[in-house]
Amino acid sequence: MSNRLQLSGLRGFYLLWLSQFISIFATRMTAFAITIWAWDLTGSTTALVLVGFTTFIPIAVLGPFAGTLVDRIDRKMVIAMSDGASALATGFLLVLFVTDQAQVLHLYVAGAFSGIFGALQYPADAAVISSMVPKQHLARANSMRSLIQSASGIGAPLLAGILLVSVGIPGILIIDLATFLLAIPALAFIAIPRPKPESDTGTAGGGFLHDLAKGFRYVFERRSLLSLFILLVFVNISTGFEYPLISPLVLARTGNDATVLGVVSSAGSAGFLAGGLFMTAWGGTRKKIHGVLGGLILTGAAGAFTMGAGRSVIPWAAGAFLLSFFNPVINASYMAIIQGKVPQAIQGRVLGVETLFSTPSFPLAQLAAGLLADRVLEPASAASRSGPWIWDGIVGDGPGAGIGLLVLVGGLISIGCGVAGYLILSIREMETILPESGPQDDVPHP
């Protein structure tokens, strides 16, 4: 397509943002509907978290290779490949549900397939933003990206609940599939520049493995980046004990009440939306690391404790809102640091290395949380006891109490990560220690 017909800079980013929002909204409806279906079928926390496990493990393993590929080929093609793979996974599930052959195992297969290509999405999205958006707008652009998840999540669970009655899961999957047919062609109207190689990163020349090694060397030669990536390992452990357990916690406490789960899910998405709008208007702290570390402390202290200790819809909704509100602050602040300190030509590889470090801990924490809930804490909460446990006064007993306790553990880990980050000089002062990546001369201004 002629460059004259393509939107560049902020205008191109806005079109990309809108097309992705439409697609992700429908995908969130699918995720909600399938969660209800899988819980009704199995009643197992482990069965639910294994969907996330099978999706994230390929992302973790393939992260560095995906990041290197993002730095070497057209990033527009990378996004199209990722969206196309998600569409194929959705089509696979549609056939199974239409023919009444769907099983929980098929969710794992679809998740793993999406994860293989989803490994491209994370480094590609971050690199695309920094190549299209002027540096002074990076924090706001990243918060807009988080708004996609939040705004879609507010309406998607409620709409999915309505559509489940009228068109069922096949109808929702058809809607999801149709949105991919809108999002992928929209890329033709967006100009996404490729970054200029920078001599100080050594990105010019060399083969694929040479470029892959450059990404690892870049991170390991910068103690601040390496320290932050190690901290993210524990951050994702806390996350694995928080967000994935919201659905089984509410369903266990309410006897599979999809309406209550929809309200709580929407409250969580409202928190994402409010946090994203807050960051978009505010732009974040002057030192972005405060947004990361302070957000982690507040997420655990306010969100996880309210959610885990809750026993009715009001505290669950409040907990989900608070858990989610600080997420855009953390993510936008973190990405602004990476995009401002790491040269564009190597951002894909650096984020790929970060994925290898941090991502495995999230699905492993999910799996551990599911097994602990199903095999240890939930049976213990339901069993007859001679006296109360020390935490009964906080989470109570009966169905869901063990899951609530795990959410509290996730909150404690989140607080610990924030405090540790402030105590580690290379993390606390990383924005002073690391040089700026240089002006984004190839980024069109609005």
Image (cartoon, helix red, strand yellow):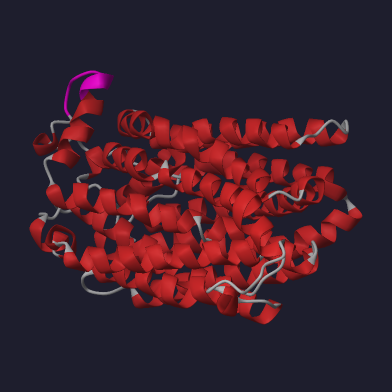
Say which residue appears at 46% left-offset and 57% top-offset. 239
Q: What residue sits 76% from the left and 53% below the top?
A: 36
Most extreme residue toward the top, as rendered?
A: 207
Q: Does the magenta stretch include residue 266?
A: no
Q: Residue at x 61, y 61 (%)?
A: 403
The number of numbered discs placed on residues in the rendered structure image is 0
Q: Is residue 45 above or below residue 327?
A: above
Q: What residue range appears in magenta?
A: 204-210
Q: Which residue lies furthest to the front in this view?
A: 386
* Percent of width and height locating residue 359: 41, 44
Q: Nearer the viewer, residue 245 or 71?
A: 245
Residue 441 seen from this side: no
Residue farthest to the right? Answer: 166
Find out whether residue 206 is within the magenta segment. Answer: yes
In the rendered image, residue 428, in percent from the top left (x then y), is placed at 17, 65
- Is 45 located above or below residue 280 in the figure? above
Residue 160 horizontal side relative to residue 130, left or right: right
Q: Is residue 435 visible?
A: yes
Q: Quadrant of the C terminus?
A: bottom left
- Give the x, y percent position of residue 35: 71, 51
- Residue 421 in percent (x, y) is at 23, 63
The foreground one among 7 and 175 is 175
| Residue drawn where x is 23% and y is 38% of the image | 345
- Whether residue 374 sits left or right of residue 43 in the image: it is left
Q: In which quarter of the image is residue 138?
A: bottom left
Q: In which quarter of the image is residue 21?
A: bottom right
* In the depicted structure, whether residue 247 falls above or below residue 27: below
Would residue 401 appear left or right of 290 to someone viewing this image? right
